[in-house]
Structure formats: structure tokens, C-alpha cells
Amino acid sequence: MHNSLWDTSNISYSGCAAQLFFFMFFISAELFLLTVMCYDRYVSICKPLFSYVQIFRAVLRIPSEQGRHKAFSTCLPHLAVLSLFFSTGTSLYLKPPSLSSPSLDLALSVLFSVVPPTLNPLIYSLRNQELKAAVWRTMTGWFQKC
């Protein structure tokens, strides 16, 4: 982040090693958490499922519209966070150097490393009706002030 903010590209060997270690550690931890979340969603929908394509196929086979809606409302927030995580990570590390700018790199880094872990507890807790009502009251109160 320092290099992005000050538009420099200098880093020491130990700093590079530490950055690589923490990057791999936190990527592994995030992927582990996303995998656990995926498994949780999988179990909550149908026991014999282990991929997203199978989840979608099973959900589309649900005969009632209400059942499909409930299943998709369970899966879609998780898939949105997963998509955000992979799309920002991919674009951050695979974009050509000619498109690199400090502000873009910083924005993608924040989207990649801060937003998905922040949204995970919110997604799980929004299944609770009381919390959902409280968030709705807060958001409508905020919008009325603007």
C-alpha cells in the first residue's frame, strides 16, 4: 500500500518475503473461509451436491417458485462475494502493467482484501429477521437524512 500511495516500486528483500508470506497466508485463509461458506450453503440446500453448477441445477429443479426464491436468496449473496473476490484478485494480479496506476491498484486491493471478509458476517447475519429489520430501519433513516 505504501508503494501505491507514494508511487514508488522499491521494496527490500525481507519486505518482499514478508509480503509474499502474508499474501499467501491470507489468500489461503480467505479461500478456506469461502470453501467453508460454500459447503455450508451446499448442505443447507441439498446434501448430495460438492459444486455451484450442481447447486444451480438442483435449485432450478425445485418445483415451487417460493422454494427456488428461498434457495437463490440463500446462495446469491455468497456468490456475489465470491465473484467480487475472484474478479478483483484476477484483475489486480493479471492486468497489464500499462493499465497500472497507484489509485487503481489501491482501489482493487481494498476491494480484494477488505470488502469480502467484511461482507461475510453481514451476509450470514442478514438471514436473521430482526437484524434485517434493524438494517432496513437504519438505511431508510440514513436515506431520509440525505
Image (cartoon, rainbow, N blue to C red):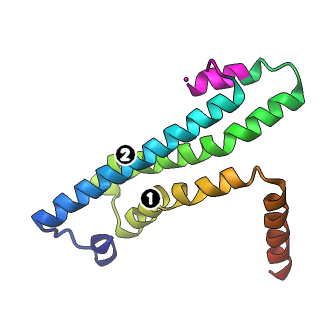
Instruction: Identify the residue under disc 2.
Output: 28
Q: Position of residue 127 (x, y in %)?
A: 76, 49
Q: Decide which of tag 1 and tag 2 comes sooner along the chain.
A: 2
Query: Toward which corner of the image does residue 16 lie, by quadrant?
Result: bottom left
Q: Which residues are magenta?
A: 47-58
Going by the numbered disc 2, the residue's amino acid type is: Ser
Q: Is residue 53 magenta?
A: yes
Identify the amino acid type marked 1: Ser
Structural crowding at the residue carrying mark 1, measured as other residues with C-alpha within 10 Å and reported as few (<14), some (14–19) or many (≥20): some
Counting from the top left corner in percent of width and height, residue 65 is at 88, 28
Given residues 138 and 49, the one toward you in this image is 49
Q: Which mark is residue 113?
A: 1
Q: Disc 1 on helix, strand or loop?
A: helix
Q: Quadrant of the C terminus?
A: bottom right
Q: Nearer the viewer, mark 1 or mark 2?
A: 2
Q: CA distance from mark 1 to mark 2?
A: 12 Å
Q: Secondary structure at mark 2?
A: helix
**Residue 106 or residue 30, whichever sits in front:** 30
x, y percent for residue 32:
44, 42
Q: At which x and y percent is residue 20?
A: 23, 55
> Quarter-wise, where is residue 12 in the image?
bottom left
For label 2, the crowd category at 10 Å Cα-Cα, with few meaning under 14, some 14 to 19 and many 20 or more, is few
CB within 8 Å, label 1 to label 2: no
Q: Residue at x 37, y 49 (%)?
A: 27
State the residue lying farthest toward the bottom.
145
